[in-house]
Image (cartoon, rainbow, N blue to C red):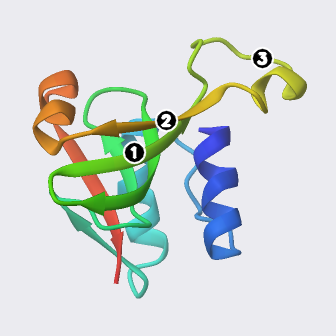
Amino acid sequence: MWFAWGRFYELYGYDPDFSGDGSSCVKELVAAHPDKFERSSSPKAGAVFSAIGHNHVWIVIAVKDNTITVQKGNLDGITNTFQDAKKDWQTKFYTLDQLRSIYGGVVFANPK
């Protein structure tokens, strides 16, 4: 979650107020900032993505046609030093169907 929090702060300039595992970040963000974000089953650029029942949270960078560009961190699944963690992220491309297939359920906190 360190990556999503930091990337969110870079994009929006304030604390997203999520601190649970990745599956709860959308719920926490919408509860903390209902004037700025809304829960959705489909993404917009700038959204936060949570995998339902999985500890995954990503930032949606772009949505074009059926392709969702996301940035995600902590790819090795271990708690790293900060120096290692800063290098442990990637930009990936998925369709919404792929994300649903991989995780069984996804939810987005879309900017209003």
Q: Tell me what residue is drawn at x 70 percent, y 52 percent.
A: 6
- Mark 2–mark 3 distance (CA, rounded to whole Å): 17 Å
N-terminal of the pair, mark 3 or mark 1, is 1
Residue 24's disc number: 1
Position of 38 relative to 96 (above/below) = below
Residue 112: quadrant of the picture: bottom left
Which residue is at a point 29% across and 57% down the rendered structure image?
108
Q: Residues within 10 Å of mark 3 (few under 14, many from 20)?
A: few
Q: Secondary structure at mark 1?
A: helix
> Foreground mark, 2 or 3?
3
Give the number of the disc on residue 21: 2
Asked which quadrant contains residue 17, the reply is bottom right
Residue contact at pointers 3 and 1, CB within 8 angstroms? no
Disc tally is 3
Amino acid at the residue labelled 3: Asn
- Which element type, helix, strand or loop, lies under badge 3? loop
Other residues around mark 1 within 10 Å, as few (<14) / some (14–19) / many (≥20): many
| Residue closest to the eye, 106 or 30 | 106
Sequence-wise first label, 2 or 3: 2
Residue 57 located left or right of residue 6? left
Residue situated in front as seen by the camera: 38 or 67: 67
Q: Which residue is mark 3?
A: 80
Instruction: Compute the Cα span from label 1 to label 2.
Output: 6 Å
Determine whether the residue tagged by mark 2 lies in a helix, strand or loop: loop
Q: Quadrant of the N terminus?
A: top right
Mark 2 Cα shell of 10 Å, populated few (<14), some (14-19), many (≥20):
some
What residue type is disc 1 on?
Answer: Ser
Instruction: Tell me how far mark 3 sits from mark 1, CA to CA.
Output: 22 Å
